[in-house]
Amino acid sequence: MAVDRLGQLLALHVTPANEQDRAQVEVLAQQVQQMTGESVEVAFVDQGYTGTPVAQAAEEQGIRLEVVKLPEARKGFVLLPRRWVVERSFGWMSRFRRLARDYERLAETLVGFHLIAFVMLMVRQYVSIGFKSA
C-alpha cells in the first residue's frame, strides 16, 4: 500500500502471503507514478525495504527511497518521521471488519474492499470538512 502525505490511498497491490513485500516495490512505484502523473520523487519506507535491488526498482520509476530508521538508543515508543502517516492509514483500515481477516479467494476482491473502505474514509473526511467550513 502506498499513501500520500495525508494518508490517502495512491496504490495498492495484493499478493499471496508467501511473496516478499520487497519484491513488490517496482509494481507499487509504477502504480504511484501512473496515478500521480510521474510527480513523486521521494518515498519514505521502513527498514524492510533496504538494499540495492529495492532502491534500483524504485529508481527505475523515478522514485528515490528514503529509509526511516529507528534510533539506536530507543526506550519505549518512538514516533518516526513520515512513518506515522502509513501506520495511521493501516489503523483506519482496521476499523473495517471485513478487512480484519483475509477471507477472499481472489486478490482482486480484496483490492476492491480496500478501495471501498478508502472511498468511505475520504467521503467522511470531505463531509466533515465541508460542514466545518460552512
Image (cartoon, helix red, strand yellow):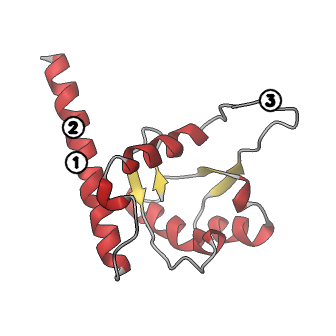
Quarter location, residue 109: bottom left
Kind of residue at badge 3: Lys
Relative to residue 106, is residue 28 depicted above or below?
A: above
Q: Are marks 1 and 2 in contact (CB under 8 Å)?
A: yes
Kind of residue at badge 2: Arg
In the picture, measured across the screen, residue 100 lies left or right of residue 42, that is left
In the picture, measured across the screen, residue 12 lies left or right of residue 70, that is left
- Name the residue located 22 percent from the left edge and 48 percent from the top edge: 120
Q: Viewer-proximal residue, 110 or 95? A: 95
Q: Residue 23 shows which numbered tag?
A: none
Q: Which residue is mark 3?
A: 75
Q: Viewer-proximal residue, 69 or 35? A: 69
In the picture, measured across the screen, residue 100 lies left or right of residue 128, that is right
Q: Which residue is mark 1?
A: 120
Q: Secondary structure at mark 3?
A: loop
- Name the residue located 47 percent from the left edge and 40 percent from the top edge: 88
Residue 66 in the image: state x and y as whole percent: 70, 49
Q: Which marked residue is nearer to the observer: mark 3 or mark 2? A: 3
Residue 131 in the image: state x and y as whole percent: 14, 22
Kind of residue at badge 1: Met
In the picture, measured across the screen, residue 78 lies left or right of residue 1, that is right
- Name the residue located 61 percent from the left edge and 69 percent from the top edge: 21
- Mark 3 or mark 2: whose residue is earlier in sequence: 3
Q: Residue 124 shows which numbered tag?
A: 2
Residue 87 in the image: state x and y as whole percent: 52, 44
